[in-house]
Image (cartoon, helix red, strand yellow):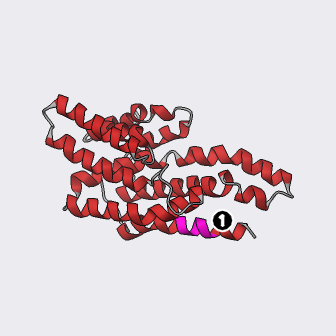
Amino acid sequence: MLKIKPCLTNAHLKQIALTCMIIDHLAAALIARGYLLAYWQSQPQIVESLIGLYPILRNIGRIAFPLYLFTLVEGYHHTHSLKRYLERLLLLAFVSEIPFDLVLSGRIWDWSHQNIFFELSLCLLLFVSLDHFKNQPLWRILILGAFALIAHLFAFDYGWKGIVAASIIFVAHGQRLRQALSIIPAFFFEYNMPMVFLSAPIVYLYNGQRGKQHSQFYYWIYPGHLLILFLLQQLLKY
C-alpha cells in the first residue's frame, strides 16, 4: 500500500492560503468590480477572457479559508499566550477593515460585510469556550449557536457557516486523516466551489512542524495587499 509522507509545515500551509487569498481578492477587486473590464473595454477578447477567468480565480480562493481555520486551530493548541494571539487578530481586524471596505465596496466603512480577521477572532474565542465545556455537550451546542448568531448579525466574512466549519475542524483536531476529512463536511456549503475541497489533501500532507515562520509578514500582508489593490483600482480609473 502506497504511503504518502506528510511534507508540508505550518509555514507552507500559510503560504498556500495567502497565495489563494490574494488570487481571490484580485478577482473580487479588479474583475468583479469592473476595473479591469472597463480598462480593456476596447478589447472585447480580453474582456471575455477576464469574465471566463473570474470564476476560476474565485474557486482557487476558496482553498484559503479552510487552511486559515486549520492553522488557527493549530495556533490555539500551541500558542504560549492566547491573550496576545487574540489581541493580534483583533488589531488586524480593525486595521484592515477600512482598506477591506474601500476595495470591495468603495466605501470607507461598510457594515454589510466585515473582513476575515473578525471571523478568525471569534473562532479563537469559540475554541476557548468549547474547550471550557469539553464534557458538557448541551453547553457546547448552545455556545456554538450563540457564536454563529454573532457572526451572522455582525456580517462577518463567512457568517454562521464559518463558525460551524471552525467547530468541525476544531473537534477533529489530533489525527491527521480525521483533520483532513473534516474539511468535507465543514465546507459542504461551498460544494458549488469544488476547489475548496483541495484543502483536504493539503491538510493531510501537514507534518506537524512549524516550519520557517515570518509571523509579522503573514499578519500585515493582509491590510498591505488590500491597500495595494485599492491603489490599483485608482490607477485603472485613469
Residue at (50, 55) in percent of width and height: 110
**In the image, residue 203 lies at what x, y percent?**
39, 44
The residue range painted magenta reads: 226-231
Q: Is residue 188 left or right of residue 33?
A: left
Q: Main secondary structure of the magenta part?
A: helix
Residue at (76, 70) in percent of width and height: 238
Residue at (47, 49) in percent of width and height: 64
**In the image, residue 166 lies at what x, y percent?**
34, 41
Residue at (49, 49) in percent of width and height: 112
Q: Is residue 51 left or right of residue 18?
A: right
Q: Is residue 17 left or right of residue 36?
A: left
Q: Amino acid at mark 1?
A: Gln
**In the image, residue 28 lies at what x, y percent?**
61, 52
Q: Is residue 128 above or below residue 101?
A: above
Q: Which residue is mark 1?
A: 233
**In the image, residue 96 lies at what x, y percent?**
45, 63
Does residue 176 show up? no
